[in-house]
Image (cartoon, rainbow, N blue to C red):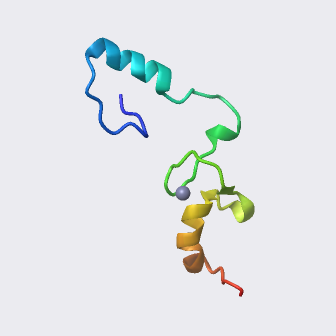
Amino acid sequence: MKLPGIKKMSFSKTRKRKVLRNNSIKKRDYGKNLSRCTRCGGRKGGKIGRYGLNICRRCFREVAQDLGFTKYR
Ligand SMILES: [Zn+2]
């Protein structure tokens, strides 16, 4: 079992199971936490759903120019 956020795990088998149970993200059937960024798969906030993008704001900053968005200053 692999968890996002936990990079190194050096626990015993029992301890590992306990850590996974208490720190893993809750499986949901619905809700805003279910929607992820289609580019990076992040679960954090700041998602842009407009124009059917469904990517997070961080990815948007990277790909906006390729998509045809221009920056006004
Ligand atoms: Zn993203």
Which residue ends up furthest to the right in the rendered image? 50
Quadrant assignment, res 64: bottom right
Figure label count:
0
> Where is 21 relative to 67, above or below?
above
Q: Relative to the observer, which residue lies in front, 64 or 14?
A: 14
Which residue ends up furthest to the top in the rendered image? 14
In the shown orientation, is residue 41 left or right of residue 32?
A: left
Q: Residue at x 53, y 49 (%)?
A: 42
Residue 24: % across, % down: 48, 27
Q: Relative to the observer, which residue lies in front, 8 or 68?
A: 8
Residue 18: % across, % down: 40, 16
Give the quarter of the figure containing the N terminus. top left
Q: Ligand 1 is found in which quarter of the picture?
A: bottom right
Which residue ends up furthest to the bottom in the rendered image? 73
Give the quarter of the figure containing the C terminus. bottom right
Quadrant assignment, res 12: top left
Q: Residue at x 74, y 62 (%)?
A: 50
> Where is 46 relative to 34, above or below?
below
Residue 8: % across, % down: 29, 36
> Where is 12 relative to 3, above or below?
above
Q: Residue at x 53, y 30 (%)?
A: 25
Q: Residue at x 63, y 44 (%)?
A: 35
